[in-house]
Image (cartoon, coloured by chain):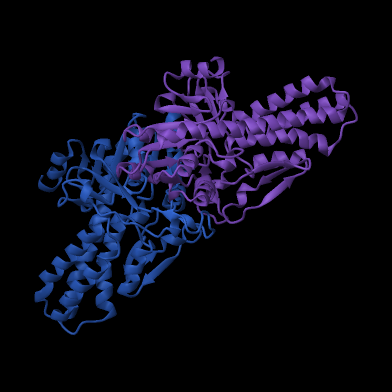
Chain colours: A blue, B purple
Amino acid sequence: MPENPIRWENNTLIIIDQTKLPEELEYIPLNTVREVWDAIKQLKVRGAPAIGISAAWGVLAGLRENPPADTAAALRQAQETAEYLATSRPTAVNLFWALERMKKAAQAAADADSADTFFERLEEEARAIHEEEIASCRAIGEYGKELIKENTGVITHCNAGGLATGRYGTALAPMFLAHEEGRSFQVFVDETRPLLQGSRLTAWELRQAGIDATLICDNMAACVMGQGRIQLAITGADRIAANGDTANKIGTRGLAMLCAPHEIPFYIAAPSSTFDMSLKTGAGIPIEERDPDEIRRGFGKLTAPADITVYNPAFDVTPAEYITGIITEKGILRPPYTGSIAGLFNG
Amino acid sequence: MPENPIRWENNTLIIIDQTKLPEELEYIPLNTVREVWDAIKQLKVRGAPAIGISAAWGVLAGLRENPPADTAAALRQAQETAEYLATSRPTAVNLFWALERMKKAAQAAADADSADTFFERLEEEARAIHEEEIASCRAIGEYGKELIKENTGVITHCNAGGLATGRYGTALAPMFLAHEEGRSFQVFVDETRPLLQGSRLTAWELRQAGIDATLICDNMAACVMGQGRIQLAITGADRIAANGDTANKIGTRGLAMLCAPHEIPFYIAAPSSTFDMSLKTGAGIPIEERDPDEIRRGFGKLTAPADITVYNPAFDVTPAEYITGIITEKGILRPPYTGSIAGLFNG
């Protein structure tokens, strides 16, 4: 797995450009807030926790881009930058969660004696977010790896690996840790149309780690399930409502609903930052719709009538009733989720 | 819809090269048996009924390629050509059905007084197969169009339109006829990875006919179903066992199984030539596996690690219990299928 897909080095945010994978592993600096916004929007950095971490560092990038004269100017600028970065993508709540933390830290640092001290305090907060998310992923891996027994067939959708987080991943963390312990298992990787995060990123990460991975098209999952080759499904999440309804990459709902008749347990893996306690159910989660040409000419070549109507939602919502458990950094939550999720935050 | 996607003109088989669509609508002649075999193998002509029709004409192409000296040589040659063409693809039973008819016609023509007369008799049989399949599609359309009420949302997978048959299609025939009657409805078209028959062919055919069509990725079906925008699913079939289990394009099984929890009726549309009464259940249907690079670099560009393991089945089997009805040229069959399918052939 990539050691540091997101770095803050010499006051510069450096990310892996995920749109170039698997052909090129390229680290790129994001020197301006606009570049951070664009990188999130264009999916150069993607994955709910990774977006949150990058946005937190993006607030610092803003203070570096236009060094403020004093603390008051720094506070104003940090808040404006946070609000701007929040407009980059709508669904993953980690983005708003991280930016809220940065805004609160900015408020708390309003008494700093200089813009430099203010910067240092925000830098501490961004680092804390970054390190906490990595620690959460590690803990998710520890809890989740017990689900992967010897010879299990696991299926995953999209990329919830190291690239999508700070390290380890969410859905992939249990696989990396089970593999480190020498357990033998097989992963089926949905390619994840239209942007192929599964074939481009997850297949690449698992391959790098030496894990037995088989790439399939999204529509092959039911076929492989019917052959009895899958005993476990794990995906990440972009936003989880208070009742357990979960928004994740388009296709997750279908995968979860196909697990049910095949009697395959379906798990979500996500840190606390992915829960949105302000939403009672998944009905309130805003779903990003993307460019029709991602489907009409996703591979450079026109593969559909140029003027065909397209519906291209980037996420869908899996009803809580199809989720066997939610693997968090504090343990695996079980239904009924309204209680177990509330316990995650109050317990 | 294309008027004559398959033609026998001046003793030459002419087809639309479906791999070129939607960018180019190109008719190509198939001058040798090898070219017919390659066209089927490479999906220049595809769709269960279209493969059957093309193979039938392919036997004639063989007799044209190497004109036999006498009836005995013609019979031997027709049989060998039929056996060779049967090796082009394994799943669609229409291929074997049509070639069996041609072999029987060849046997029956063994008393022909010359190779020319023999040829004429086989030509009659190929034309009969071709015309009967078109008539069956038309009848499927007549029975099926009643399922498409005003404002229905219909979903289909792969291409079972005019291109896949002689004309009208199987799954698309009800849509073409309902549209001709002025009914207003919307079709969601699964793009159908890896070879995109949905986006390349079905979207194109529906667009040509002026039908309201929306392209989605295969993994978006559950999302659109959850929004209440789909009231009916219809797909074609490549082989139907005696109990109703149905092999069709990979992804059909998942689509059918997702219809169940969303309470959407799921129909198969297929002529009698698609039934294989020699198989009690779908377990015996041979499933073609295709080149991994269709998934790893389907559009020219590498979109996965070059050496990643791939599983690429071209078809899957939908259990009969998920099929609401099978629309045939003789009416809509209902469960229990063992009885209703037997009735199709004995009744």
Q: Residue at x 30, y 45 (%)?
A: B227
- Would residue A179 appear left or right of A52 to someone viewing this image? right
Q: Is residue B47 left or right of residue A204?
A: right
Give whichever of A317, A347 is nearer the camera.
Answer: A317
Q: Residue furthest right?
A: B69
> Residue A318's spot in the image, x, y percent?
28, 42
State whether residue A222 appears in this view. Answer: no
Residue A109 x, y percent position in the rendering = 12, 72
Q: Is residue A147 visible?
A: yes
Q: Is B270 placed left or right of B124 in the picture?
A: left
Q: Nearer the viewer, residue A207 or B73?
A: B73
Location of the C terminus of chain A by quadrant is top left
Q: In the image, is residue B41 above or below residue B207?
A: above
**Residue at the location (52% across, 60% down)?**
A300
- Give x and y (percent) for residue A193: 43, 50
Identity of the residue furthest to the front in this view: B181
- Total residue callouts: 0
Which residue is rendered at x = 23% and y = 43% of the image?
A245
- Placement of A323 over or under A163, stated as above or below: above
Image position, residue A289 (x, y; %):
34, 57
Between B239 and B302, the one nearer to me in the picture:
B239
